[in-house]
Amino acid sequence: MATTVRRMLTWLGAAALTAVAVLVGPTAAQAATPAWPTLSSGTSGANVTSAQFLLRHHGRTLSVDGYYGSGTVSAVQGFQSANGLTADGIVGPLTWSRLVVTLDVGANNNAVRALQTALNKYGHGLTVDGAWGTATTNAVNSFKASRGLTGGTTVGATTWQWLIGDGQGGGNYRLVIGRSVLPRSEYDDPHHDYPALDLPTWTGVTTYAITAGTISHVGGGCGYGIGISGDDGAYYQYCHLSSRSVAAGSRVSAGQVIGYTGNTGNSTGPHLHLEIRVNGGNRCPQQMLLALYDGASVPAPSALPSSGCTY
Ligand SMILES: [Zn+2]
């Protein structure tokens, strides 16, 4: 990799980041609860599957296929009408709040299937059978501990919001940090010298695998760095972490926790440095990360430009 991996923090930027860190605390667990995603006709992915299972739990008839088609629109409209909501066929914050139900150990229903589907976004690999047994308990405990959530094994509205709203993204890809950590404007910034993206987080922000693949550890100027050789054929490199939580050679799924942001290696302030390489050449990550932030259709790595994102 290039020898210079250095974030150019302006004095003003550093001051603003300090203020953010004071306001919301140094760890992801203390960050604000992520916003509910808005699902509508044509969207797809695990959150759509969870919504479909929750609609079934509330007695609606529809296919559970992870695709928001006309059958899902009709089921959502029926659910909204029955609950005094505007029947627009779109699952936004109000509809999510009515769809989720409080669950605990021993439950056996379609809401548990929605929960198991959501937990699997974070790499838990549960069988989606609707039966809350030991494996589901372990996954819930792990997820709640990683987000600093209280209340024992109970999955209430706040835990649902973290499960559905955090680490979201489209298809086989997930945003690399929680959506609520940074504003959208941080995802389109150019990088110095060569195509990459610097996300100015504070230290300790939970970092997720952008896609499924095999882990390598990277050192040198990258500090505690992680490479993911993606199943999509692209290579993703994260630098300057404070710690890694996956071993070299291990497999990860999209959205799995791989470590925590930091300031190790050749870095002048806490940030997450991200590179995407296709056939060894760096691509501009900005369009891909913005699509993930927006919940929009994600461009293939090979479709990303190889210039135009540097200063
Ligand atoms: Zn950088």
Image (spheres, rainbow, N blue to C red):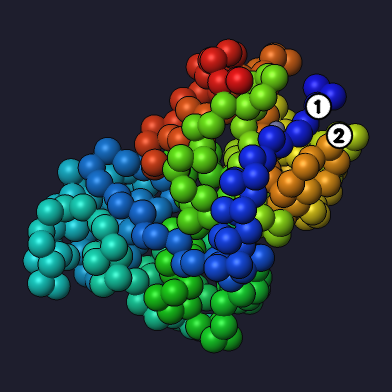
The part of the image, by quadrant, that contains residue 147 is bottom right
Tell me the crowding category of disc 1: few under 14, some 14 to 19, or many 20 or more residues within 10 angstroms, Cα based. few
Question: In the image shown, does 68 or 275 lie closer to the viewer?
Answer: 275
Looking at the picture, does residue 122 appear above or below residue 84?
Answer: above
The part of the image, by quadrant, that contains residue 133 is bottom right
Question: In the image shown, does 269 or 30 lie closer to the viewer?
Answer: 269
Q: Which residue is mark 2?
A: 221
Residue at the front extreme?
A: 11
For residue 228, side relative to residue 52 (left or right): right
Looking at the picture, does residue 70 appear above or below residue 235?
Answer: below
Q: Which mark is residue 4?
A: 1
Residue 127 x/y as whole percent: 55, 60
Q: Secondary structure at mark 1?
A: loop
Residue beneath the point at 19% across and 58% down: 76
In the image, the residue with mark 2 has its CB under 8 Å from the nearest atom of ligand 1: no
Q: Along the polypeptide, which appears first: circle 1 or circle 2?
A: 1
Residue beneath the point at 45% across and 31% down: 298
Query: Of the residues shown, which amino acid type is indicated by label 1?
Result: Thr
Q: Secondary structure at mark 2?
A: helix
Residue 214 x/y as whole percent: 74, 37
The part of the image, by quadrant, that contains residue 223 is top right
Image quarter (top left, top right, bottom left or bottom right) of the C terminus: top right
Find the distance from the CA under tag 1 to the CA under tag 2.
7 Å
Residue beneath the point at 39% across and 60% down: 35
In the image, the residue with mark 1 has its CB under 8 Å from the nearest atom of ligand 1: no
Query: Of the residues shown, which amino acid type is indicated by label 2?
Result: Gly
Question: In the image shown, does 142 or 34 lie closer to the viewer?
Answer: 34
